[in-house]
Amino acid sequence: MLRISTSPAPSFQRHDSRTSRRKLSVASNLNHHEPSTFSPRKVLVLTKLSRYEFEKLRHANLNERQLEETLRKRGSDYNNILYHHTLHKNCEAMVVRMLAEHNIETKVVNRFDYNEKNINWADVIVTTGGDGTYLLAASRILDPNKPVIGFNSDPTRSEGYLCFPKKYSHNIQEAIDKLCKGKFRWLFRKRIRITLIGDNIYEPPVELHDQQLQHPEYRFMDCLQELQHQSNQLKDMSRNKRVLPVRALNEVFLGEALSARVSYYELAVDNGERSKVKSSGLCVSTGTGSTSWTFNINKLTHQSVGDLLKLIREETNLPIDFQDQKLIDRITGKFNNNLIFGPEVSLMGYTIRDPVSDGTLPTPGERRSRGFAEKMEIRSRCFDASLVIDGGLSFRFNDGTVAIFSLHDEDALRTVVLNEP
C-alpha cells in the first residue's frame, strides 16, 4: 500500500541562473529518490463550487422554479447548468467511493470549509473540479509532505492542466489503483513566497472569484483569523514586515486596480540596481505558471512572425520567403516554446506588461521587459494597486509598500504524476 513519507522533503539541486536560462525549455533534471508510496488514512476532498451552486447562493430566496426563470431571462441555459453540475457531483461521488474501497477515510468540503482544522486532519488533499479548485487547495498547503492531487470533474469545459489527464476523469478507479500500487512519481512544483514590507500590510485580502456573491466569501478569512495571534506577535517584533500565509503556484500580478491607469513601481532583479518602471503591470510566474498567463502575454503569433520576416527581407535584402508557412510555424513554435520552463526549476519568469516611457525613465529598449530571476524586489509607487496571487486572492499594494518575491525549497508543492505505459 502507498505510504505518505513523513521524512523531510528532499533537498533541491540549486540551478546556476545562467545555466538555467539556457535550458528553460527543458524540464528540470532534479531527481527525487523518495520511494513513490501512497497509503493515506485520511483524505480531504475539496470540491468545486459549481455554477449551479453559485447561482443558488446568489439567489438564496428563490425556489427552484423561480431560479430557473431568473436564469432563462438573462439568457442562461438552466438545463445545461444543471447538467454540468451533475457531471461534477458524479465525479466527486466516484472519487469518494473509490477511496473508501481502499479503506481510506474521506471528508468532503467546499471552499467555505477549507480551513486549517480540516487541512491538518488530512494526510492528502484531493480536488474535484478544475485548475481553480486545485490552485485554491495548493495555496494553503505549507507542509511539503502533504500532497495535492486533482481530478478534472468536467473535462468538456476545462483543460485542467494541473489535474490528472482527462482520461482519468472517466476512469477514476484506474487512477486511484495506480496511486495505491505506487505507479507514479512525485513532482515538486516550485512556488513563490511573498514578503510585504510597509504600512497596512495586515489588511484582509479580497477573494476575486466570489465578489458577485450576495454575501462575499473570503476563502482566506479563517486563515487570517487563525494567524491573528501570531500576527500580533509579529507586529510587535517587526511591525512593518510580513510573509503572506499563502504561496503562488502559478503567478503573481502587480498593478493598478483600474486597468486604464498606468502602474508605477521600482524594480530590482536578483539584488541588482533598482529601476523605475511605468507599465500596465508586472507578472511574475513559476515554471508551472509559465504555460499560463505569462505565456499568453509573451507569445508570438504567426501573423507577427510573418510581418517580421517581411521587414527583415526589406531591410537586409536577404532571400527570405515571408510567406513560407512552414518557416513561420518553426520560428513561432521555437520562440514560444522557449517561454516555458519546468515546474521544478528554481527560477521565476517575469514580464513587464506594455512598458512605457515618458522621457524621464529608461526607454523599453534600455531595459529588459522580460527575463528570469531567483529573487525580485518591487516598491509600489501606485495609487490604488493590487497584488494578485494565482488570479484569485488580491492584497492591497499601494505607494511605499515593498514586495519581495523569493523561492524556497521548503515551499515546493508535492504533487503526483501517474506512470503511463
Image (tube, rainbow, N blue to C red):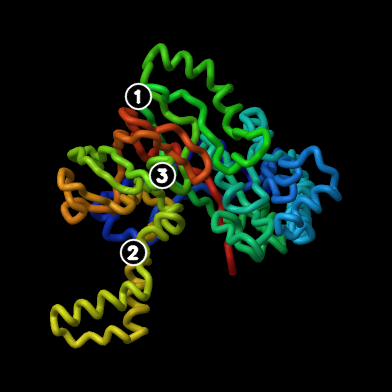
The percent position of residue 39, horizontal first and vertical second, equals 67, 45
Q: Amino acid at mark 1?
A: Gly
Nearer the N terminus, badge 2 or badge 1?
1
Q: Nearer the viewer, mark 2 or mark 1?
A: 1
Residue situated furthest top in the rendering: 236
Q: Residue at x 44, y 59 (%)?
A: 291
Give the CA distance from mark 1 to mark 3: 18 Å
- Residue 286 seen in this snapshot: yes
Q: Which residue corresponds to the image point at 30% horizontal and 37% vertical from the top-left?
A: 378
Residue assigned mark 1: 198
- Disc 3 marks a residue whose amino acid type is Phe
Name which of mark 3 and mark 2 comes first in the sequence. 3
Q: Where is residue 356 drawn, in percent x and y? A: 25, 50
Does residue 271 sit above or below 346 in this rendering? Answer: above
Can you tell which mark lies on residue 338? Answer: 2
Rounded to the nearest angstrom, the CA distance separating label 3 from label 2 is: 21 Å
For disc 3, the marked residue is 253
Above or below 191: residue 77: below
- Under circle 2, the secondary element is loop
User: What x and y, as percent, mark residue 82?
Assistant: 78, 56
Query: For mark 2, does the 10 Å Cα neighbourhood hold few (<14), some (14 to 19), or many (20 or more) residues?
Result: some
Specify whether 81 is left or right of 17.
right
* Label 3 SS: strand
Report the residue at 50% width, 46% height from top: 391
**Between tags 3 and 2, which lies in front?**
3
Residue placed furthest toward the left: 316
Mark 1 residue element: loop
> Residue at coordinates 61% horizontally, 29% vertically from top-left?
116
Q: Which of the two labelled residues, at mark 1 and mark 3, occupies the earlier sequence position?
A: 1
* Depicted 120 relative to depicted 355: above or below: above
Kind of residue sitting beneath label 2: Asn
